[in-house]
Image (spheres, rainbow, N blue to C red):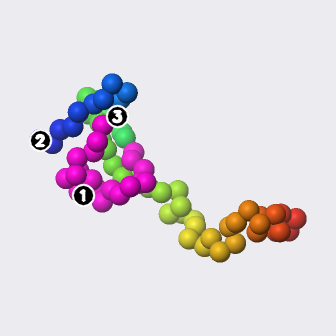
Amino acid sequence: MITSKLSSKGKTTIPKRVRAALGLREGDRIAYSLEEDRVILRRAVSEQADDPFHAFDEWNSEADRRAYAGL
């Protein structure tokens, strides 16, 4: 069994073996499901996964937003 400790503010560190098993990295989102007396922890599916253009950020600056705001 893998365990971790809960802080007074409700925070914990996800153990390295669990992070590795789920392929979690810094910034990843985690989904929790409650099933009777259990909590299921999963890697959350990114909302960007549904957006084929999420990686295109060439025109994603404040200057570009102002320049193209009226289009």
Name the residue carrying label 2.
Answer: 1
Q: Are marks 1 and 2 in contact (CB under 8 Å)?
A: no
**Which secondary structure lies at badge 3?**
loop
Seen in the picture, residue 62 relative to 8 is either above or below; the reply is below
Q: Is residue 69 left or right of residue 56?
A: right
Amino acid of disc 3: Lys
* Residue located 88% across and 65% down the image: 70
Q: Nearer the viewer, residue 18 or 16?
A: 16
Q: Indicate the quadrant where residue 6 lies.
A: top left
Q: CA distance from mark 2 to mark 3?
A: 19 Å
Ranked by sequence position, the earlier of labels 1 and 2 is: 2
Q: CA distance from mark 1 to mark 2?
A: 15 Å
Foreground label between 2 and 3: 3
Ranked by sequence position, the earlier of labels 2 and 3 is: 2
User: In the rendered image, which quarter contains the C terminus?
Assistant: bottom right
Span shown in magenta? 12-31
* Residue located 42% across and 50% down the image: 29
Amino acid of disc 1: Ala
**Where's residue 15, x and y in %?**
23, 46
Label 1 environment density (alpha carbons within 10 Å; few <14, some 14–19, many ≥20): few
**Where's residue 62, x and y in %?**
74, 62
**Where's residue 69, x and y in %?**
83, 63
**Where's residue 17, x and y in %?**
19, 53
Name the residue carrying label 3.
Answer: 11
From this viewpoint, which residue is outermost toward the top?
8
**Which secondary structure lies at badge 2?**
loop
Name the residue carrying label 1.
Answer: 20
From this viewpoint, which residue is outermost toward the left?
1
**Which secondary structure lies at badge 1?**
helix
* Residue located 11% across and 41% down the image: 1
